[in-house]
Amino acid sequence: MRLEDQEMTDKMRRKGIFVAAVTAASVLLSCSREESLTPTRFRDDLLFEFPQGNTEIDRRIQTIQENFNCYVIYKDIEQNHLNRAWINLYPGMVFVANPVPQNQLNTFLSFLEDNVFRYFNPQLHSSLFPRYFFLVDGLHREDNGVAKAHIPCRTDGVDFWSLSFQSDQDGYILQYDEKKMRITFAYKAITLAFNNGLIKIPSTFNEGIDYKNPVYGDPSNEWHYQTRGFVKYVQPDFEYESPATDITVIAMAGEDFLMYVRKILFSTPETFAAENGQYDLVMRRYNIVLDVFSEFGIDLNAIATGE
């Protein structure tokens, strides 16, 4: 083939490719104009009928929903609802509970009103609560049919928390630890606010704090944890507290601050001062933490004492 013919062939080939590309683009554009995509409508479907009744209790429940966008559910809660969790920490186990007896419903709801929601502001804190708050009786895990310990508070559900009391054979609620349940729910809401950046640690909280050298429980040691500005380590489940002697835990991001939160909730202003009053650094940081939460509309000491 002559050089002139070869050049002509190449030009035609390139032109053909260009035309094909333009044609394809035109088809796509035409399709997009004729069949424009529309957003899928978000369906905000509830798992339960709400409200679940037409009594004064249901009206109180509806007020909670209106204030905090949290649906308090007390019936039609099935096992599959209780077992929806982000992570299954107990493979082979299932959560099991009974419905709340009708004559106990007021006790359950009064607990939520008096020990949970009244410490939070609907305008500031509605995002801190789950979609659902389940009220159940005798919540526990079962391992191959073997019942485990009662679980009064659960806050690890996908979109729910749960409150549970235990009843005796005659249907009366057994004694329960009101404070521990109150601070457990409050601490969950607080950690959500902290993790979402709604509560920030002020720079003054970390001033003069050494997060490198070890800490000790002996008060006579110059590196004693309270002398260094640290408080006792209260377990996140509020089962017990112990001297803070592991600097690697204390130095974890945000942990020192949350240790103060847990210690304040676990104590009272009087017991905190009696234990830490002689340590100026601890008391200075204590007041900083109280001020941070006061500005956020939360009174930690009121939650601690139940005032």
Image: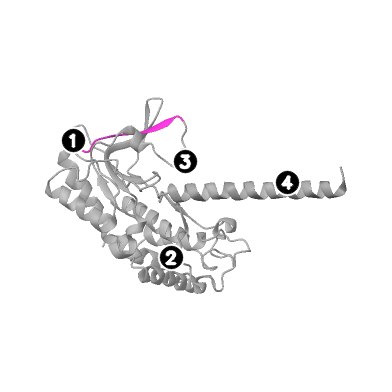
Q: Nearer the viewer, mark 4 or mark 2?
A: 4
Spatial CA span between label 4 and label 2: 65 Å
Question: In the displayed structure, would residue 172 be above or below residue 197?
Answer: above
Give the secondary structure at mark 1: loop
Spatial CA span between label 4 and label 3: 59 Å
Q: Amino acid at mark 3?
A: Ile
Chain-order first, disc 1 or disc 2 = 1
Question: In the displayed structure, would residue 281 be above or below residue 155?
Answer: below
Magenta stretch mostly in which secondary structure? strand
Q: Which residue is mark 1?
A: 171
Q: Amino acid at mark 2?
A: Ile
Q: Which residue is mark 3?
A: 87
The residue at the far right in this view is 2
Q: Position of residue 146 (x, y in %)?
A: 38, 27
Instruction: Check residue 13 in the rendering and tell me which mark sits there, or answer none.
Output: 4
Give the secondary structure at mark 4: helix
Q: Is residue 36 visible?
A: no
Mark 4 surroundings: few (<14), some (14-19) or many (≥20) residues within 10 A: few
Q: Amino acid at mark 4?
A: Arg
Give the secondary structure at mark 2: loop
Residue that appears at 28% across and 57% down:
68
Residue that appears at 84% across and 50% down:
4
The residue at the far left in this view is 55
Q: What's the magenta region? A: 92-100
Q: Which residue is mark 2?
A: 199
Instruction: Compare residues 52 and 42 and report the one nearer the observer.
Output: 42
Q: Nearer the viewer, mark 1 or mark 2?
A: 2
